[in-house]
Amino acid sequence: MAHNSQKGFSDSSVHVDVKDYYGKRLQKTSDLKTGACVAPAHPPPTFVREALKKVHPEVTAKYYGCGLVVPECLEGCRILDLGCGSGRDCYMLSLLVGEKGHVTGIDMTEAQLEVARKHTDYHTKEFGYKKPNVSFVQGYIEALTETGLEKNTFDIIISNCVVNLSPDKKQVLAEAYSVLKDGGELYFSDIYSSGRLTEEIKNHKVLWGECLGGALWWKDLLQLAEEVGFSQPRLVTASIPAVDDKELQDILGDFKFVSATYRLFKVPKGNNRTCQVMYNGGITGAEDVFHFDCQYTFKTNQVVEVDGEAACILTHSRFAEDFTFQPPGGSCKPCDKSKADIVDPFELALRLTSKGLIPATGGCCSAKSADCCK
């Protein structure tokens, strides 16, 4: 029976099952039955690895994400982590945003939040901060404002293999859009399916807990994002997760799954003008080369013509100061290419695999992988 855990919002049977799976059944990463919720083995960038080393071991041991979600240009930002779990990503990001930034984690599973909150003082001292720059809230990603999170508050929202666990993906996107500032970004890694799943798969508790039963058909993400108000989702990177359990394979049948990272922005719509831009360099971890998505790689002081939507994103987001627009000899002009080409994440994952390029983080694919879907 559903019960109230947050004013105005009630647990569904899915929420209850997910809480049980992540709060009681899973005690460590090795308890997972598939590779859908395990981060890729390829090592992340050095500055991220160094930040992860400072995270308390218990927090890391209770981490069940499907990737490493680290967008660029984080210094001083206010970040919200949807489904933060034990807080691993929150603490890692709290170091990257610096003492003037802030990270908020939200999760519905109290057992996970207990682990996260227990180590707040540890990380404050470890990072050399005068006071904590991270906080944790119990609540639902479908009802962010009901937890007290204010609208137009966050620069960035991240999510790591969590949106698929929600029974109402559109509501999750709508709430994320609401609490983002104008120009803000939803940067998230999740599991997507090759088609709309059957009721048998969606009702299978283990498959749902393993991030497969609730997977959205990737094309539906494009439609839902547009309906909510976001810019067209821009695919950053993708990989194919392993499903080695024979019993689960039989239930899944011919359906395929992909772990994909997308970036969605809250920016004005209607821009149909391409623009020439030049990356100024200097973003931490991308000082010389900035891999924006799988279609655009920006190298310092090189002019690149971008589609109209990308131009709008760069001019209205936190990246605006990192680019020079309409450099000498260039211009913004009307063009048929107002939007980015839609890239199939399954095709991208196969191309990356064939080139031996396993993505390390959502925001840090290699130069070759960023070019491979052109």
Image (cartoon, rainbow, N blue to C red):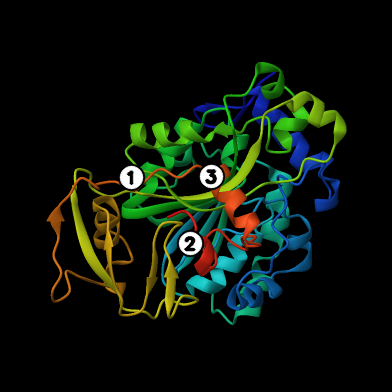
Check if mark 2's residue and mark 1's residue have beta carbons within 8 Å.
Answer: no
Amino acid type at circle 1 is Ser
Seen in the picture, residue 365 relative to 251 is either above or below; the reply is below
**How many residues crowd around disc 2 within 10 Å: few (fewer than 14), some, or many (20 or more)?**
many
- The answer to which of 33 and 258 lies nearer the viewer is 258
Q: Earlier in the sequence, mark 1 or mark 3?
A: 1
**Mark whose residue sits in front, 1 or 3:** 3
- Whether 80 is drawn above or below 73: the answer is above
**Depth check, front residue: 356 or 84:** 356
Question: Is residue 205 left or right of 228 when viewed as pictured?
Answer: right
Specify the label residue 231 is tagged with. Answer: 1
Under mark 2, the amino acid is: Ala
Q: Secondary structure at mark 3?
A: helix
Q: Nearer the viewer, residue 203 or 80?
A: 203
- Residue 111 appears anywhere in the view: yes
Q: Of the numbered discs in the image, which one, if any, rests on residue 345?
A: 3
**Residue highlighted by disc 2:** 370
First reached walking from the N terminus: tag 2 or tag 1: 1
Q: Earlier in the sequence, mark 2 or mark 3?
A: 3
Residue at 53% of width from left, 44% of height from top? 345
Can I make out residue 133 in this image? Answer: no
Query: What percent of the width, then of the height, locates residue 189?
Result: 56, 50
3D distance between C-alphas at marks 2 and 1: 20 Å
Q: Are marks 2 and 3 in contact (CB under 8 Å)?
A: no
